Amino acid sequence: MQDRAVATISANPTTISSDHPCLQISERRANNYEVLFDFGAYKELQNLKPFLEPEEYQRKREQLDARTKNNLLTTLMERFNVQVSQVRYEMVNGKLKSPDHDDPMEDVIVRGQQYRLRNGNPIDRPREVAEVINFQKRQEALKRGAKTNVYISPRGADGTDYIHHFFGTDEVQADGSILTSIYTLKIPHHELLEAIQKLNRNYAKPQPGEPFDAFVIRNSIADVPIEKVLSVLHQDESSMPLSEFGVKVEIPTRELRDFYIKRAAEGATEQELSAIRKSMLKLADLSTGKDTFTLDNANALADIQTLTRAHGVQAIIALLATQQLRNVPTNCGIQESTTSAWSVGEFGFYRDGSGTLQIICKTCGFSYMRTSAILEQGCRLCSGKDGIAC
Ligand SMILES: [Zn+2]
C-alpha cells in the first residue's frame, strides 16, 4: 500500500527566515492553502460519486485532474519567473494587428468583453472594461511615438476567472513591429502600487469604489525603459523562457505532479499532499540550480535521479519533503477558479470551426488558448498529444 510508504514522511513546517508578511503568506499558501483546497475538491468529488453516472464522474474527474495539474504548473511558473509568451503585432491603419487574426486586436478584445458582459462572471466586469481601455491606451501611445509600454494585470479578487498575476511589455522593434511579452509577476497586491510608482512617480491614485485590479489594468505606462521595468517588477532573477521551463522544470517534476494527483484522488491526507508538493518545489529548485541550501545542485540532482530509478517517486518525497525550501515571494492571492483566462481577448476568439480554443493538455496540465483557425500538433509546453490533437 502506498499509505505505508508515505506515512514515514514528516511534514514539519519550514521555519520562515524572513518576517516579510508575503513570504509568510506564500509559505502558508504553498504548504497549506492549495493543498487544503485540492484535498477538499477531491473529497467533494468522491462524496458525489455515488450520485453520478459513471461517464459524468469520469468527466468531472478528468476536469479536476487537469485543473489541479495546471495549478501546480502555475505555481512552478511563478516560482521561476517564466516568460509566458510573446506576440508580435504590426501597426496596420493605426491598429495593432496580430498575424494570427484577421481583425485588429482591439476588435478581438472588445468582442471578448461584450461576450463576457452577456456570459461572464460579474466580479470580473470592471477589469474586463479596464482591459479594453488598457489596450486602446497602449495602441494610442505607440501611435504617438512611444517606444515601450508596460501594463500590469494583477490576479482578480476572490471568485475571479483571472487567476494569473502578470505584467506585459510592448517594445517597438527595429523593423517597426511591436513585440509584446508576458511575464509572471511576483509582487503581491499590497506592494504593487509602490512598485508601479517607481516606474512612474506621477502614477494615478486608485479611485474610490473601483476594484484594484481594474484600476491597475486601466493605467498602463508608456516609455519606461524595459530594463527598468524588468528590474522593478521582476526583481532578482531574469525570466526563464517557456522552452527552458519545459526541459528543466516541467519534465523533471511531471512524475511528482502525477503522483500528487493520484494520491489526492485516492484520498491522501493534507500532510502527505503537502509533502509531495514541497518535494516538487525542491526538485525544481535543484533542477534549475537555484536551491540555495544545497552546495552542488547538479550533483544532488544526479543522486536523486539514481534514487528514483532504483526506488521510485516515493523515495524522492521521503528525501526532499523535510528539507529546507527556498522562500519565493509570489503573489499573496488565492487560486480557486475553474477557468483561468489571461485576458478578456481570449473570449473574443473563443471558438472557430474547430471547436473551443482553450487547450488543456492532459499530459502536463498546461492550459492556454490556441491560435484561431489553426489546430495544434501537440502541447506547446511538453509536446504531448493527449487532450490536444484530434
Ligand atoms: Zn503539455
Image: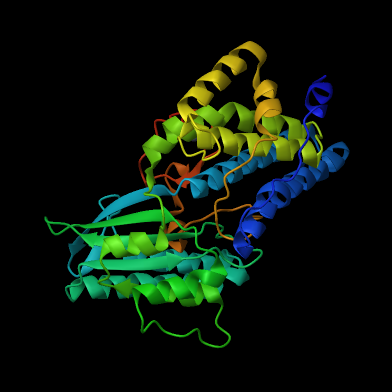
Above or below for 129 versus 338: below
Q: At 72% across and 52% down in the image, what residue appears?
A: 33
Q: Of residues 294 and 166, which is closer to you in this image?
A: 294
State the image quarter where residue 270 is shown.
top right
- The count of marks equals 0
Residue 62 visible in rendering: no
Residue 336 at x, y = what percent?
Answer: 66, 55
Residue 227 at x, y = what percent?
Answer: 28, 60
Above or below for 100 versus 206: above
Query: Which image quarter is the N terminus in?
Result: top right
Whether residue 152 sits left or right of residue 106 in the image: it is right
State the image quarter where residue 211 is shown.
bottom right
State the image quarter where residue 218 is shown.
bottom left
Above or below for 180 versus 218: above
Residue lying at the far top in this picture: please name it: 310
Q: At 58% across and 39% down in the image, what residue appears?
A: 281
Whether residue 353 sits left or right of residue 322 in the image: it is left
Q: Of residues 77 and 130, which is closer to you in this image?
A: 77
Q: Of residues 191 and 269, which is closer to you in this image?
A: 191
Residue 221 at x, y = what percent?
Answer: 33, 74
Whether residue 345 sits left or right of residue 254 in the image: it is left
Q: At 70% across and 35% down in the image, what residue appears?
A: 322
Residue lying at the far bottom in this picture: please name it: 208
Residue lying at the far left in this picture: please name it: 175
